[in-house]
Amino acid sequence: MNRINKLFKEKTDNILSIYFTAGYPSLNDTEKIIKTLDECGVDLIEIGMPFSDPIADGPVIQDSSNIAIDNGMNLNVLFNQLYGIRKITNIPIVLMGYINPVYQFGYEKFINRMMECDLDGLILPDLPLDDYKSNFKSIFDKENLSFISLITPNTSNDRIKKIDENSNGFIYMVSSSSITGKKSTFSRDQIQYFNRINNLNLKNPKLIGFGISDKLSFENACDYANGAIIGTSFIKNLSNINIKDSIKNFIANIRSL
Amino acid sequence: MKYNVNSSGFYGDFGGAYIPEMLFSNIDELNKNYLSIVEEDSFKKEFNYYLKKYVGRPTPLYYANRLSEKYGSKIYLKREDLCHTGAHKINNTIGQILLAKELKKTKIIAETGAGQHGVATATVCALMGMECVIYMGEIDIERQRPNVERMRILGADVRPATSGSKTLKDATNEAMRHWINNPDDTHYIIGSVVGPHPYPDMVARFQSVISEELLVQLNKVEGRDYPDFIIACVGGGSNAAGIFYHYLDNSKVKLVGVEAAGLGISTNKSAATTKLGKKGVLHGSKTLLMQDENGQVTEPYSISAGLDYPGIGPLHAHLSDSNRGIYISVEDDEAMNAGIELSRLEGIIPAIETAHAFSVFDKIDMKNKVVVINLSGRGDKDLETYIKWGKY
């Protein structure tokens, strides 16, 4: 059982996952951000691998990606930063990004470096299921790594079942038909969608992402899933001057009673 | 159909649909419906009606007497520059807007680089009374003012893409994001043979009217329906795909694609994707892609705004990779000189994209051969660039 499976076994609700872009605001912030998030009691971390053309992301994540790339972030640098991360934290860590940088790095080398760093999962939204099956699945199954897939309000039930079968860890429920960073309070349509998914009895737990920005939207999301993912608003709140405090304040706000 | 798309959307190793789940339902809807729609008799009839009455097809196949004399070949020009709006782009936008109507879409979005596809899209939206949003890189908006105003006159909402490098690839990103946010009522008219399957095939089919006409026209004047060489410029590659289409599996025809080398392929200021690109994934398709060693997409350069795309359609990646096609690249100055030469010898000022296709005579031996060049667009939009270049 990997750390993600273990997390969802031990905790079934109010799971908070934070996304940040590796290499932002500064190239070497990765360890500091992970450590602080862990200390703040965040449950899961998604590390964004920056790409020049992130079509599923809004301007905040795109800008942070461009800055990260300009700062010198790439997969080699990131894996070097994450090598030894298990000495300081046991929090589940997922890498998230677009297929092209991973493809250039080499799938096999990428998976090896993931294992070397003892990471837990991968999200590649533009990787087709068939490509996952032929290039990743057997080794992911063997090494107990999680492959996490997205579903949206427009994903059909049949397709969701297929995605659920081929995923492991959790299902990433995109809250609405949108790119990241859009504001939302849940509409009737969205609630209907969440209920539809919950009635499918999927084998994987679910986290809601996209449009979750603060305490209220986090708590709303937790009513319909095991927890939620915050990315854009976390990145917006990262301060270049005192990064630790900005993280602590942000998380404290989400988790406040 | 060795070189055309296979049933899973691939051209050899290239193509496919590498899209996030947020685009899956849009692409799936197209994929399930496009073939049955475009093959319906009623669709074909309507498509052909607009091509004939509105676009002005068939476009002439013109024997370029003085150019032929100069280079010792029999050179024919396929006059796509005479299409309404001044380029082949409208063949595709007519096809796609009719398809969008069949799919009950009410709004259209598109990306544009130089503005030609944007104008062709704004035009058909006006024709069909549909709402139209065009994404264009902020930098391109500055460079291509007249086309921006043409689109606005036609009623389109031209929105600047302010992210990334602020050019064509970013306009494409923005259009895709718009589509993710509006999946139900909107159709995205991609302007070239790029993007996730079925776009490359769909656009190639709509553009294939060019080679369909060529078969008949050439047969009349040459007594055979195929030439020895077909030459076309390639950015994403839609005009080339259109004129190659019916000849893909005819090995007697040499297919020549001409890319923009910009200031030279070793200068960092180039758009010669088959020379400088590596296999990669951009805008939903696996293709040859200009990128750095970390897989970040690099910004191409060409004097012609219509050729500076960092990728190339997967069909062309396959034709190049399999050596079915000959892909060469010509520099800014060569293309500009060829444009001036065509103007002086034949009285036709070509678009600068198109001028690239006219700079191949000293690169490929075509003596005494029958050569067809796709004259994909006219140069009116490029006057300012010609003037700035100034060497005429």
Image (tube, rainbow, N blue to C red):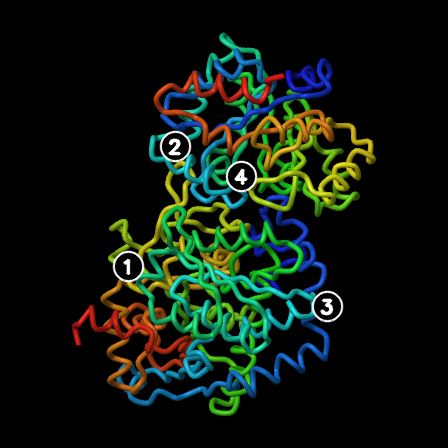
Which quarter of the figure is the N terminus of chain A placed in? top right
Q: Mark 1 touching mark 3, by CB under 8 A?
A: no
Is A61 situated above or below A218? below
Q: Residues within 10 Å of mark 2 (few under 14, many from 20)?
A: many
Numbered disc 2: secondary structure = helix
Which quarter of the figure is the C terminus of chain A placed in? top right
Q: Which one is in front in this view, the residue at disc 4 or the one at disc 2?
A: 4
To which chain does the residue with label 1 belong?
B
- Where residue A198 sits in the image (x, y, percent)? 79, 33
- Where residue A235 sits in the image (x, y, percent)? 47, 30
Residue at 49% over, 17% down: A248
- Mark 1 → mark 4, Cα distance in angstroms: 37 Å
In the picture, the disc for residue B36 is: 3
Q: Residues within 10 Å of mark 4 (few under 14, many from 20)?
A: many
Please identify the quarter of the rendering in which residue B36 is found.
bottom right
Q: Mark 3 touching mark 4, by CB under 8 A?
A: no
Q: Amino acid at mark 3?
A: Ser
Q: Residues within 10 Å of mark 1 (few under 14, many from 20)?
A: many
Numbered disc 1: secondary structure = strand
Q: Mark 1 touching mark 4, by CB under 8 A?
A: no
Q: Which one is in front in this view, the residue at disc 3 or the one at disc 4?
A: 4
Residue at 42% over, 70% down: B116
Are discs 1 and 3 located on one and the same chain?
Answer: yes
Are discs 4 and 2 located on one and the same chain?
Answer: yes
Q: Which residue is mark 4?
A: A181
Q: Which residue is mark 2?
A: A68
Q: Amino acid at mark 4?
A: Gly
Horizontal side, residue A220 vs residue A157: left or right: left
Q: Which residue is mark 1?
A: B262
Numbered disc 4: secondary structure = loop
Residue at 67% over, 82% down: B45
